[in-house]
């Protein structure tokens, strides 16, 4: 979810679900150790529980980055062994790490020795044309010996050459049974399934076999799906769920605060309103008039005003379009 699940996105998602775990976009060790740490690591206290997802393959660098994550207050550090992009491969990390389980184990051990928070691994079920379950079983077994107890399994192979990252999310076939078998083979580990999951019925079906479900694109494009999660999976009173209109209103203080801190678009180093509102385009998915809502929040002239009340104007336009007075 590079360039998607940034801190603005996570604050928005937290307005919808109080208890769902949120994950950062992947941050490379190089960016943390040699770049602007605050830009990559700063987050709002309301985001908890939130995990820092790291990209890297050098145990010492990952250990240092994990320590930074703990110092910044993250609740978990996650090592990405699933990203198939060629840019990531050039750095010798992401999905290509699945071919080096001993190295991943060393990375996990180095991080676990450096922090007190959980260290988890996100990975695919195989790389390229490999079709054997044994490959992912042996990968998980090796990494588990280093002390990792939580594996987030994107149940597709990663094709390292010839497919774009988008195609890698769609073309390799899903093999959910591989994740189910991992849970049977490693009952003491927490196995969380990921990949192509879109509905509550699908989530419930997977939870019959594994410990958890991770959503990616569906949570982004249809975020209000998460409104059911707290009551359904965390025992929270359903009366606490915010309406979509209330979520927009709840975002306004955050947007005003961010604009006060960083300045409006046009100021030196100013914040573009679109950098926050772009994550909210899918909030009205499935409702009459949702297209009008998206059109307002995609209008460059309106966005250039930097007026946070554009959110409520988008909602009013949606209502008028749907014939609601």
Image (cartoon, helix red, strand yellow):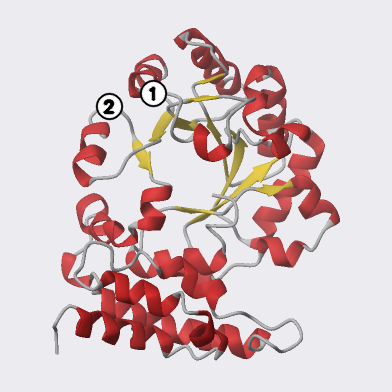
- Tell me whether circle 1 and circle 2 mark residues in contact (CB < 8 Å): yes
Please state, as top left, top right, bottom left or bottom right, where the C terminus lies in the image.
Answer: bottom left
Q: Please, what secondary structure does the residue beneath circle 1 have? A: helix
The correct choice, above or below, for 91 with respect to 73 in the image is above
On the image, the x and y values in percent for residue 147 come to 58, 27
- Residue that label 2 marks: 209
| One can see residue 47 in this view | no
- Residue drawn where x is 59% and y is 67% of the image: 43
Q: Is residue 104 left or right of residue 127?
A: right
On the image, the x and y values in percent for residue 263 come to 66, 88
Q: Is residue 128 left or right of residue 174?
A: right
- Residue that label 1 marks: 179
Q: Quadrant of residue 171?
A: top left
Q: Residues within 10 Å of mark 2 (few under 14, many from 20)?
A: some
Question: Front-most of 110 and 199?
Answer: 199
Q: Is residue 158 left or right of residue 270?
A: left
- Residue drawn where x is 36% and y is 37% of the image: 196
Residue sticking out furthest to the right: 34
């Amino acid at each position: 979810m590079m360039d998607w699940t940034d801190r603005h996105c996570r604050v928005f998602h937290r307005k919808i679900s109080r208890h769902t775990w949120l994950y950062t976009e992947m941050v490379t060790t190089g960016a943390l150790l040699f770049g602007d740490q605050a830009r990559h690591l700063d987050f709002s206290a309301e985001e908890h529980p939130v995990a820092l997802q790291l990209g890297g393959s050098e145990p010492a660098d990952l250990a240092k980055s994990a320590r930074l994550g703990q110092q910044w207050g993250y609740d978990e550090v996650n090592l990405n062994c699933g990203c198939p992009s060629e840019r990531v491969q050039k750095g010798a990390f992401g999905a290509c790490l699945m071919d080096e389980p001993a190295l991943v184990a060393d990375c996990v051990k180095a991080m676990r020795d450096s922090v007190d928070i959980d260290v988890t691994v996100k990975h695919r079920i195989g790389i390229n044309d490999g079709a054997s379950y044994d490959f992912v079983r042996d990968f998980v077994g090796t990494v588990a010996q280093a002390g990792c107890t939580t594996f987030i399994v994107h149940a597709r192979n990663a094709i390292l050459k010839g497919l774009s990252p988008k195609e890698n999310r769609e073309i390799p076939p899903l093999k959910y049974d591989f994740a189910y078998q991992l849970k049977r083979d490693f009952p003491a580990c927490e196995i969380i399934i990921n990949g192509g999951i879109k509905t509550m019925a699908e989530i419930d079906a997977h939870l019959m076999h594994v410990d958890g479900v991770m959503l990616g694109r569906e949570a982004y494009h249809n975020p209000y799906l998460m409104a059911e999660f707290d009551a359904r999976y965390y025992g929270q009173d359903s009366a606490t769920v915010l309406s979509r209109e209330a979520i927009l209103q709840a975002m306004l203080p955050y947007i005003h605060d961010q604009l006060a801190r960083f300045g409006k678009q046009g100021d030196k180093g100013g914040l573009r309103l679109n950098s926050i509102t772009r994550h909210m385009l899918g909030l009205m998915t499935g409702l009459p008039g949702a297209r009008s809502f998206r059109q307002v929040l995609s209008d460059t002239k309106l966005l250039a005003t930097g007026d946070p009340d554009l959110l409520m104007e988008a909602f009013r336009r949606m209502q008028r379009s749907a014939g609601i007075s």
